[in-house]
Amino acid sequence: MITENRIAGNRSFIAGVLCLGILLFSSVASPVSGAPLSEDSEACLDCHVAVTPGIAAGWKKGRMARVTPDAAMKKPPSERRISVKKPSEKTAKVVVGCAECHTMNPEKHKDTFDHNGYSVHVVVTPGDCAQCHPVEVEQYGGNLMSHAYGNLQGNSLYRSLADATNGLQTFEDMKITHAKSDPQMDADACLYCHGTKVQVKGLKTRDTPDGEMDFPVLTGWPNRGVGRINPDGTKGSCTACHTRHGFSMAMARKPYTCSECHKGPDVPAYKVYSVSKHGNVFAALGSRWNYDAVPWILGKDFTAPTCAVCHISKVVTDEGDVLAERTHRMSGRLPLRLFGLIYAHPSPISPDTTVIRNAQGLPLPTELTGAPASKYLIDPKEQAKRQKTMEKICLACHGREWVDGHFTRLNKTVQYANDMTLTATKIMLSAWEKGFAKGLAQKDSLFNEAIEKMWVEQWLFYANTTRLASAMTGADYGVFANGRWFMSKNIQDMLDWLKLRIKYEEMSKKP
Amino acid sequence: MITENRIAGNRSFIAGVLCLGILLFSSVASPVSGAPLSEDSEACLDCHVAVTPGIAAGWKKGRMARVTPDAAMKKPPSERRISVKKPSEKTAKVVVGCAECHTMNPEKHKDTFDHNGYSVHVVVTPGDCAQCHPVEVEQYGGNLMSHAYGNLQGNSLYRSLADATNGLQTFEDMKITHAKSDPQMDADACLYCHGTKVQVKGLKTRDTPDGEMDFPVLTGWPNRGVGRINPDGTKGSCTACHTRHGFSMAMARKPYTCSECHKGPDVPAYKVYSVSKHGNVFAALGSRWNYDAVPWILGKDFTAPTCAVCHISKVVTDEGDVLAERTHRMSGRLPLRLFGLIYAHPSPISPDTTVIRNAQGLPLPTELTGAPASKYLIDPKEQAKRQKTMEKICLACHGREWVDGHFTRLNKTVQYANDMTLTATKIMLSAWEKGFAKGLAQKDSLFNEAIEKMWVEQWLFYANTTRLASAMTGADYGVFANGRWFMSKNIQDMLDWLKLRIKYEEMSKKP
Amino acid sequence: MITENRIAGNRSFIAGVLCLGILLFSSVASPVSGAPLSEDSEACLDCHVAVTPGIAAGWKKGRMARVTPDAAMKKPPSERRISVKKPSEKTAKVVVGCAECHTMNPEKHKDTFDHNGYSVHVVVTPGDCAQCHPVEVEQYGGNLMSHAYGNLQGNSLYRSLADATNGLQTFEDMKITHAKSDPQMDADACLYCHGTKVQVKGLKTRDTPDGEMDFPVLTGWPNRGVGRINPDGTKGSCTACHTRHGFSMAMARKPYTCSECHKGPDVPAYKVYSVSKHGNVFAALGSRWNYDAVPWILGKDFTAPTCAVCHISKVVTDEGDVLAERTHRMSGRLPLRLFGLIYAHPSPISPDTTVIRNAQGLPLPTELTGAPASKYLIDPKEQAKRQKTMEKICLACHGREWVDGHFTRLNKTVQYANDMTLTATKIMLSAWEKGFAKGLAQKDSLFNEAIEKMWVEQWLFYANTTRLASAMTGADYGVFANGRWFMSKNIQDMLDWLKLRIKYEEMSKKP
């Protein structure tokens, strides 16, 4: 919490008085719904309707602007959107306005600052959202995504991949010098999705339409990455998927939200989905579906899965049978991590993957040759449990023979893609061994030379794409669109590269 | 047909009795429309509403659940969605429910099995759909797509491309060993779109919520490829485009359906469309169009073409003029096959392309140097006829000068792309000749070495993309997005590769 | 204007009389709105409803078919869609039909021809649209896009890139011969977006359903590129974005329109947008927005920007505050040209960039080593002004800290991408210097050899993509999807290429 009690400029002070004016001692009707708005939020809106009109208007369109926690509790449990057992008395009877979130837990927020007499913080966090949604926040804390910052930044190998990707390369005297990446570059790249570390670096006085005011200076800002480290010490950003300030459930249930971070060649889940039968049904008929319903009824509200259906949402039948319980620990439905690092492997036990070490001592979930670091990965029993959870959703629309056939193929493809990665790895190990590139033995980065980058594409782009294409039946991406074709071609290119250098070597040794 | 008469477990038997119960001797009202549902379908639904709720709900949303063939016949011919002259008496007076399709022609279906006393088959086929849609099924039988399985699997060259793409490569002692692809790998890749061969391999007993039951074991399952070989001997899968179990015409008329198989770099029709003016109009205004209307009226129901408009649908004007007759033999509107194998060429005469041999004896529609294997391809007269059919649709919205200008450019681009392919081919032939790679003369695969894979990309990705971009005016894909830029660059890369090896060769021969 | 007064065939003449018939001396009610349609347009429609039914139907769906200029003027200025101060008396009282545009300014149009007694021209131009939209046409004339034809065709360097891309390459005797591109090839590629030069090459007689008729023969037709050179001497095509014949504002405001030309790897603005939070909100919630409203109210009509919001549209708040004035000189909101040629640089002063020469005398806005040709580029003051214009829109939904943080990162990334381009450039210069490729010194194309094409991709694809990803927060494209990964890999590939040739050179010089 920022404790410096700076004296606001006169203009600011007067503006504050004008804004807050007579609103101090009562709640008023929400401008949207007639439901009560807290006096604090009313005060915020009084200025911010003009200062940040888009934010105010976005909020007004959402459910938070219309429903008080007390009203939300009156629904039967199966229709509730909040998971708190009993809303806090302080906020239960007003709609969720600006102040309800931006002034919550001021003592925990290092970004709290004095704003017209209010202790406001900029960065709303899972810790704040937990006021009404504690179950989701707790689940999410067990989700890999909530650790996305540390799992990248605290892993020396992944960090060296980030440096080799984002760091400046300069060329002088026929040599490339590799600089490390800098925080701004990382924030604009990897950490956009993984999340930044948001820290307060003092206050800054700014001229505003209402005079001079003080605002906290934040590092790593802006950011809404899934593993953001927040000024209150919490991890993640609910707005990564539940976009401010409407926080629409419909939006989170549509695949576009996931596509923000799952579309690139390293993890093209959205692209694969878009050419799958599921994605096709969504694209063609999805405009007629109901994405706001709670509970979400399969067949009635939607007729094919979006990402959320299989990975997150509570899904029920028209008869009320529960096909899947809602979870914000998405890995709970995933027996395997298809996203190869470097090979596909059973999902990690802990969402904090920095604890993992393979037999070689590397912070990787498998050996360089593919064997899993099993101690850190879920066991077959847990895998089977997760598999069953997922299958229950499949079986709502597909026969057992269909589902079994699908997963048999997926497992075959996972093995195949791992085997092709092993082939590429052996070629690279051979290049290291023969001195054509510098690798582990020379304590050099694994990711900074031409042949190494070919190898990275083998698993990060092509094997990943092929596996995802198999898992979500977007076969186009399993063949010519970064799929098997590229795995097979890349191996030939790597071999070609290696053989040419071996021939050269042999020739240069001729007397 | 599976004839083993296994004794179902007791629980299963009782469940069957409970399910079928009193429903045996009358038809009942459809749960959807009030129109009569057959007693057999009612029996199916009785359990399957709970067992596969998504399928039941999807079916309920479709037209099949609401309209009996008799009712469908009452519409004037121009508004009919069925093409049978007189519906079969057996099914004319009930809506098209589960049993109507899944118990049709049991004697033809090798996948027929006893299911609670019914002779049910899993795989519904064009042979079944022909009951009401015989014209479409017949047309489709003349369509290249219906032969997509055999045209790939029965062509030794294409098959070797599939093996070089999907087969496992292993690396030992500085050598790559190429394995053939296996059926599961193919089913997960090429055959997802081309179709698998679905065969019955006996029965398997499974535990179900209603006790033990027997189900057929199927190879190549699941699959919905356009050229699927079915257990009743028919070819194709209507659900490739008319997705089960709503079988929505609207869906088939939207480009997303085509994109399932026509989006990859080998045949990026959807991507090209999406950056064309036509695709732009569809994306921006298409949510206001009527995709369900029969007949489909240009200008009223839609204002720009989707894939179906140009290639499949019956299109009429508001005055009732017919611009194009409906066809499920899509090649009927295509004078050229732009999809280069290896060069663009006149469309093949027979949908079974395994009969084709070029002068060299290879199963290709052109020589390796581009000359067409004319004997197997449509003649100029047939080309002109197809061209005219297509142009009639263009001319509804474009002047003659516009249309002529467009096709002049397309023909120029087709020639250009063929010429650039020839250049790449000559470089590869030179590499073979000089011993830098093994090709036809060595009876080696044409597709398994680095230089060969560069050559494949020249025609399969870049020339194809450029031609499609020209045909559908998605110019972005004709220049920098896998278009001319990549053709021009790939030729330089191939030349670079070749020249380096020639220099090396010369040097190694120096005394 | 075509002055040959050819005698139309008899059938044509009679058809004309039948078409025009009794319609010569009065205006009639529009078939759409009841508003008056000119007798001339009525005459057009009389035939064209049948001859080009799609055009007629498209027009009927648009606002032009319903509203007369006089009616349009009755709205308050802030709600007007036309910018003329006083509509021309001739057209003020009729809706904007066929004749109003296609017979306007006949004396200026070299493509005017006699059509059933009317002086009609085919190509409607900004000069015609200016009748009602003079402000937009004037603004657009100051926009870079309006000069897109000349800026490419009149720049020897860019022209040589086009030739190296579109020109035919042939291979004989181990050598590639590069042909120049031809006009049809360019029209099908670069000029699809940039615009062609449309010129009249006489008349041609055609058989039509109404007998023989004469029509102008046009070069560069069809085309709707943004910088099209028209037969009346004007530049551009309003239908590039306001698609004929509905001319929907909604369509122009949706990002699909921009994507026609801004989706490829050289300028993937649409793709970047689609993975940004803005694009996600549009995709998920945009179907509920109002794209037709004038004025366009932020928060009420839409809750996240489309391309138009930030770059073109007039945007107001619900309180009537103007956040941005409408402009068709889109560069007016852009301090920097991120689209690197070869490096990102301040926006050019003149929309005609053929005047630019760098210190080396090349027609480039920067030196080959990155320093800007400042004389031709806007100064810091103008940059600051444009920056402020853009930021005002950002600040509607984002705090100052957020906005500042965003642009700090963008500027950093612009510098980084320029620096990485410099590294690649140095490697290429070294290749030239050592004789491994031919460049400026040999007066050879900079773009026609393998190493040069690698260099082009560095700035044209990867640096451009990375900068756009930063500017529009589509981070996926800033990392693995043609972003930093490819910049870093391409440099290693170029270095690898160069080092191998140096080693070869050294070896071949060994005694």
Image (cartoon, coloured by chain):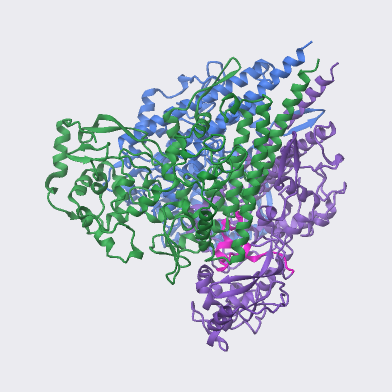
Chain colours: A purple, B blue, C green
**Residue found at x 61% / y 63%:** C402
Say whether residue B386 is left or right of residue A148.
left
Measuring from the top left, give residue A305's x and y in whole percent: 58, 56
Measuring from the top left, give residue B172's x and y in whole percent: 81, 30
In the rendered image of this protein, does residue B372 appear above or below residue B388?
A: above
Residue at the top extreme? B511
In the rendered image of this protein, does residue A234 appear above or below residue C440?
A: below
Name which quarter of the figure residue C125 lies in: top left
**Residue found at x 13% / y 40%:** C17
Residue at the bottom extreme? A25
Between A468 and C473, the residue placed more toward the observer is C473
Say whether residue B298 is left or right of residue C193.
left
Quarter of the figure that contains the C terminus of chain B: top right
**Residue found at x 23% / y 32%:** C214
Residue B317 can be seen, yes or no: no
Quarter of the figure that contains the N terminus of chain B: top right
Residue A255 falls inside the magenta stretch: yes
Measuring from the top left, give residue C413's x and y in whole percent: 64, 50
Say whether residue A45 is left or right of residue A261.
left
Say whether residue B200 is left or right of residue B244.
right
Magenta range: A233-260
Between A82 and C203, the residue placed more toward the observer is C203
Measuring from the top left, give residue A173's x and y in whole percent: 75, 34
Residue A101 can be seen, yes or no: yes
